[in-house]
Image (cartoon, rainbow, N blue to C red):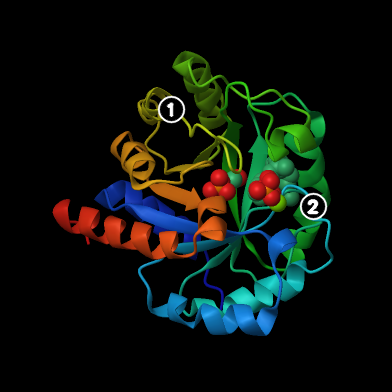
Amino acid sequence: MPKSKNRVGKILKDYHKTGRKGLAWLVDPDKFKNAALFEEEHAWVKDSDLDLIFVGGSQLSRDNFKEVVISLKKISGEIPVVIFPGSQMQLAEEADAILFLSLISGRNPEYLIGHQVLAAPIVRKMKLEALPTAYMLVNEGEITSVQYVSQTIPLPNSKPNLARATALAGLYLGMKFFYMDAGSGAKSPVSAEVIASVKSVTNNPIIVGGGLDSLAKVKTAYENGADLLVIGNAIEKNPSFLAEVLEYKMLLNISLNVN
Ligand SMILES: CC(C)=CCC/C(C)=C/CC/C(C)=C/CC/C(C)=C/COP(=O)(O)OP(=O)(O)O
Ligand SMILES: O=P(O)(O)OC[C@@H](O)CO
Ligand SMILES: [Mg+2]
């Protein structure tokens, strides 16, 4: 399918308008093994109720980003493949869009604006749809890969007012999407209070990820205002979890009458 202008942005804004809940599966290129086997095992994905495929990692120790995106495009059908970049190195023209992140919970200029300046001309050349995204790490106590790599302190899960003020700053800076991340594999996901407090100040789509490894955690995040959930590690550990969450989301959307 040819890239159409603002397609992914429209999908995300639609969740907010209709109340429909979405799911993104995060594929980590560092853990990607055999392309042919991956494509065979995931041939069902294009016919599923999955909303988006995210691709990215905080480390990227392997030079396979483009290859992974090409494989994902083969199994995704109409489902958009969106880059979730850990750095300006993670770009591929085959993708449909990029979360143009600024890590506004931190105070590291490289992750606030540095990577973005290096990436911007390439994003333009590749004609990727850029999604201006306020990226906030929310965690208390654990050191996750993203924290370590970005050398930033996350917002505390127990201080919803700080998250709210940070999101408001993002909003006034013109950011259109809000991504709260507890960090990959986090023991505790972003708290209900933090999600709800950010939701209370913006009508823009809210993305939540990090440590969502049970249907109970998925339910809490959706109920407190997440429009799109992102799951990576729990699916790596147990591939059938993706189908379980998709089933849960479908039933939830039917019960909300927004399917
Ligand atoms: C190029 C642009 C616009 C921005 C890139 C630079 C920024 C601001 C990045 C945000 C901070 C960061 C390092 C995000 C990485 C997010 C990500 C893809 C995490 C995926 O999880 P991993 O941390 O790789 O998980 P594992 O530790 O489980 O492998
Ligand atoms: O791997 P998990 O813990 O699902 O986290 C997904 C993503 O939000 C991490 O940046
Ligand atoms: Mg990784």
Q: Position of residue 131 (x, y in %)?
A: 57, 51
Tell me the SS state at disc 1. loop
Dot 1 or dot 2, earlier in sequence? 2
Mark 2: secondary structure: loop
Q: Amino acid at mark 1?
A: Ser
**Relative height, residue 34 to residue 173 (above, below):** below
Relative image position of residue 243 (x, y in whole percent): 38, 65
Among the 4 quarters of the image, the one containing residue 185: top right
Name the residue: 55% across, 56% down: 237
Q: Position of residue 244 (x, y in %)?
A: 35, 60
Residue 251 lies, with reference to residue 174, above or below; the image says: below
Nearer to us in this view, 234 or 80: 234
Few, some or many residues within 10 Å of mark 1 (<14, 14–19, 20+): many
* Amino acid type of the residue that numbered disc 2 sits on in the rendered structure: Gln
Is disc 2's CB within 8 Å of ligand 1? Answer: yes
> Is residue 1 at all visible to an observer of this figure?
no
Q: Can you tell which mark lies on residue 191?
A: 1
Residue displayed at 53% across by 80% down: 41
Q: Residue at x 83, y 56 (%)?
A: 61
Q: Which residue is mark 2?
A: 88
Decide if residue 232 is in sight here.
yes
Give the CA separation, mark 1 to mark 2: 29 Å
Q: In the image, is 65 to the left or to the right of 103? A: right
